[in-house]
Amino acid sequence: MRTDVTKINEKTPWQGLTEGLQMFAGGTAKYFATGEWRTNTPVLVQDKCRQCLLCVPVCPDVSIPVKDGKRLDFDYDHCKGCGICASVCPFGAIEMKEGIEP
């Protein structure tokens, strides 16, 4: 059974996939751009953001990067648009837009 998921791509024959498409290694999500699954997209409104970072720990896809104690814009390659970040933001700094483009 294949366990090296870094070599699985759209050209991989079915024989090269894992059983049930299971992932057997940790940290493999970074190899797959799953953001194209979105139907809604969070958009950061910089003027409203107070850098409270309440949105960061609730993101199930770790799509809100933080550098030097400040949140950056979304990692749209991995964000699936669940909207949890927008619902926890007390300042209305995250708006959900329809579609996959910010």
Image (tube, rainbow, N blue to C red):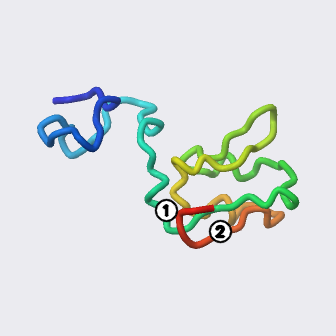
Who is closer to the viewer here, 25 or 40? 40
Q: SS of the residue at dot 2?
A: strand
| Residue 27 position (above or below residue 85) | above
Q: Residues within 10 Å of mark 1 (few under 14, many from 20)?
A: some
Q: Which residue is mark 1?
A: 38
Q: Which residue is mark 2?
A: 96
Q: Position of residue 36 (x, y in %)?
A: 45, 56
Total labels drawn? 2
| Separation of residues labelled 1 and 2 (CA atoms) | 11 Å
Corner quadrant of residue 1: top left
User: Residue at image x 23%, y 41%?
Assistant: 11
- Which is more N-terminal, label 2 or label 1? 1
Left/right of residue 79 with respect to residue 89 in the rendered view: left
Q: Position of residue 54 (x, y in %)?
A: 75, 51
Q: Quadrant of the C terminus?
A: bottom right
User: Residue at image x 66%, y 58%?
Assistant: 85
Residue at the left extreme, as displayed: 15
User: Residue at image x 67%, y 41%?
Assistant: 65
Task: Give the amino acid type for the residue marked by disc 2 in the picture.
Answer: Met
Corner quadrant of residue 44: bottom right
Who is closer to the viewer here, 69 or 73? 73
Task: Give the amino acid type for the residue marked by disc 1 in the picture.
Answer: Arg
Left/right of residue 91 with respect to residue 58 in the rendered view: right
Q: Position of residue 10 (x, y in %)?
A: 27, 44
Left/right of residue 16 with respect to residue 33 in the rendered view: left
User: Residue at image x 41%, y 30%?
Assistant: 26
Residue at the top extreme, as displayed: 4
